[in-house]
Amino acid sequence: MKYILILFLVISTVYANETKNIEIRTLSVKEKKKRFIKLVLPPIEKVYNELQTQYEEVLEDMKHSRNLYKKEMLKERYKVQSDEELLMALKPHPKSIALAQAAIESAWATSRFFIEANNIFGMWSSNKNKPRIAALKKRGNKTIWLKKFDSLEDSIRAYYKLIATSKAYKEFRELKMISDDVYLLEEKLNNYCELGDEYCSRLQSVTRYNNFTKYD
């Protein structure tokens, strides 16, 4: 009886997801974009505000030489040595960039990874002990795994931390401290995708065409 119940729940979940996918596929482009903003903008704003508040607090702590233990804990978390590197890691990049990447990586919140795993940014997983989901396509005989998150907010936090800690985005972090030019910053995200510079051009186009900078 127990196994029958489990099978029923699995089938019900699959059916519900497939029904949702069919409903999404019938939406117009305008409707998909409206749905995307409704789903993704609020959690991006929430996480951004959390990170911005933390950045400002640490900046003030540094000016007054206080909460040194907290600063050292954050350095360990973000894998940095200097105060300057910590500030580069903590300062969140513009919401418009996160929105543009989310739009591309989640196909405007319609991808299977978005729907089934709350994975907005196509983040891969190499840890079999953490929740993840297999991609339908393989690389040769190798299965591609993507992270599975409990919520969209968790996905966004993981994305911001990736940008804050990976060596691939060091130039992006450095530029972020001296420029608020979204389009210049997006040129430094060529390592996020195998498309390289073409990916940066797509980010810029999506940002500009959808006027995402109005959310910054």
Image (cartoon, helix red, strand yellow):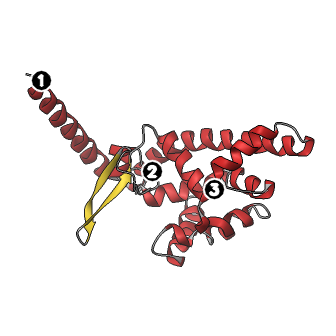
The residue lying at 46 percent from left, 61 percent from top is: 104
Q: Residues within 10 Å of mark 3 (few under 14, many from 20)?
A: many
Q: Earlier in the sequence, mark 3 or mark 1?
A: 1
If the image is split into quadrants, where does the N terminus sit? top left
Under mark 1, the amino acid is Lys
The residue lying at 55 percent from left, 54 percent from top is: 99
Under mark 2, the amino acid is Ile
Q: Which of 177 and 109 is in front in this view?
A: 177
Circle 2: element type: loop
* Residue 215 in the image, given as x and y percentages of width and height: 65, 49
Q: Residue 97 appears in which quarter of the rendering?
A: bottom right
Q: Mark 2 points at which residue?
A: 120
Measured Cα–Cα span from mark 2 to mark 1: 34 Å
User: Horizontally, is 135 left or right of 186 in the view?
Assistant: left
Under mark 3, the amino acid is Ala
Whether residue 27 appears in this view of the structure is: no
The residue lying at 63 percent from left, 56 percent from top is: 164
Q: Which of marks 2 and 3 is nearer the N terminus?
A: 2
Q: Residue 185 carries which label?
A: none
Q: Residue 12 appears in which quarter of the rendering?
A: top left
Measured Cα–Cα span from mark 3 to mark 1: 45 Å
Q: Residues within 10 Å of mark 1 (few under 14, many from 20)?
A: few
Can you say whether 148 is above or below 125 in the image?
above
Q: Which of marks 2 and 1 is nearer the N terminus?
A: 1
* Residue 57 in the image, given as x and y percentages of width and height: 79, 39
User: Horizontally, is 92 left or right of 197 in the view?
Assistant: right
Q: Mark 1 points at which residue?
A: 2
Q: Residues within 10 Å of mark 2 (few under 14, many from 20)?
A: many
The residue lying at 18 percent from left, 35 percent from top is: 10
Q: Which mark is residue 164?
A: 3
Tell me if label 2 and label 3 are in contact, CB under 8 Å: no
Whether residue 196 appears in this view of the structure is: yes
